[in-house]
Amino acid sequence: MTLKKIFLILITIIGSHQTNAQKFDDLAQTPPMGWNSWNKFACDINEDLIKAAADNMVSSGMKDAGYEYIVIDDCWHGERDENGFIHADKEKFPSGMKALVDYVHSKGLKFGIYSDAGTETCGGEPGSRGHEYQDAITYARWGVDYLKYDWCNTGKQNAEASYITMRDALYDAGRPVLFAICEWGDNQPWEWAQDIGHMWRTTGDIYPCWDCEEDHGNWSSWGVLRILDMQDGLRKYAGPGHWNDPDMMEVGNGMTVSEDRAHFTMWAMLAAPLIAGNDLGNMREETVNILTNKEVIAIDQDTLGVQGFKYSSEDGLETWFKPLAGGNWAVTFLNRADTDHEINFNWKDHEIKDPDFDYAANFKAVTYNIRDLWKHKNLKTTEKSFKSIVPPHDVITLKLSRK
Ligand code: GLA
């Protein structure tokens, strides 16, 4: 071997070592599930509240149903010390972040934290800009398992480059961390973030209403249907390990039970991360029943990892299909309107073709058993028409299983 060749091989090895940072694989083969403090509590958080959320996630049955992460959002921060290391707010978190993480872990749950790619978070706390590697090391020392990384106060920063910097910092710190990109879809992360994050927000913030825009002056937050409509065209970018995130849920935060049920179901049809955003210590029975419906959760968590698509839309009634593993399907009839909607769906009149992937259902050739996932009841098969009534702002959700 010539000296030149040896030199080239050495350069290649060194070069590849410098660039081998990547996202942690295998962390989100199905959409992440958990709870986040922001939607209900915003900046009004402290260590007792987070501990109680962990306790209640277990006692409510949510952990059993698959919820895993307790994520603390904005406003946990104290100041950076003289060496630039970030600390938790001493008044809100007198025991320190490590103790809180240990507590959450002791419940068999995982811990998520929040930061921002810019100089300050959206709540005006210290951002990670210029401290990415230092913050990643701090999170690893605390035992953090999940990082939501926001996009306020980023000036002229490039989004893709900024998220790569934090991804690499997390990887180098060595502790597997699920990386949740939150730049509200402004820079089309679905086009570049597949190898950077495990999920990416597709929209601005959600608001607990069915179909409204909440005007905050120079930005808006959006009701459930508005967010749902903004997902159009994005399903082809998502899959195991990299999910579209239509934002944390507002189930239990003031909408009607029907609206909460429809919201939860559509997030499952979208294979969205299921991150609850309500007060877990103060839930109506209906809220618990929605959040822990294991049959609907199984649609979200289906191993195929393919989002549903809108098959038809007529007079405020939308029909959605989601391909599932084993050649099965989930079907949801969503009534967006303010009045009842009758359904008479003759399966054999419809041929279902996935618009983005190679899945199809031909009801003339294959018969499916039908199960109602909210009534928890087996119905007849796809041999006969499905007839029912969908109440306003509600859903009927069926699983079709090959006979
Ligand atoms: C942004 C995010 C929200 C929340 C707040 C915190 O608005 O989109 O989800 O994290 O910041 O300030």
Image (cartoon, grey):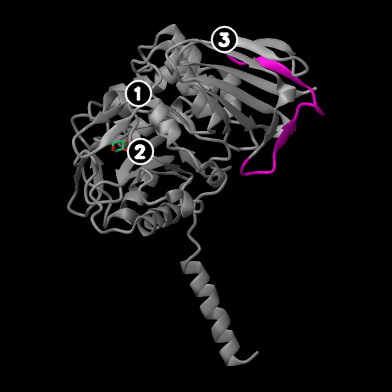
Observer-side mark, 3 or 1, equals 3
The stretch in magenta equals: 355-374
Judge from the rendering whether residue 217 lies leftward or rightward of residue 28; answer left or right.
left
Is residue 61 shown above or below 77? above
The mark nearer the N terminus, 3 or 1, is: 1
Q: Quadrant location of the C terminus?
A: top right
> Relative to 24, is 399 on the left or the right?
right
Q: Ligand 1 closer than 8 Å to the CB at disc 2?
A: no
Majority secondary structure in the magenta region: loop
Rendered-image quadrant of the N terminus: bottom right
Q: Residue furthest front?
A: 315
- At x 62%, y 41%, the residue is 355
> Residue 365: within the magenta?
yes
Disc on res. 113: 2
Q: Which residue is mark 3?
A: 389
| Label 3 secondary element | strand
Q: How many marks?
A: 3
Q: Which residue type carries mark 1?
A: Lys
| Residue denoted by label 1 | 51
Of callouts 1 and 2, which one flags the residue occurring earlier in the amino acid sequence? Answer: 1
> Which quadrant does ligand 1 occupy?
top left
Q: CA distance from mark 2 to mark 3?
A: 43 Å
Q: Residue at x 38, y 45 (%)?
A: 185
Closest to the observer, 304 or 177: 304
In the depicted view, which residue is nearer to us: 334 or 36? 334
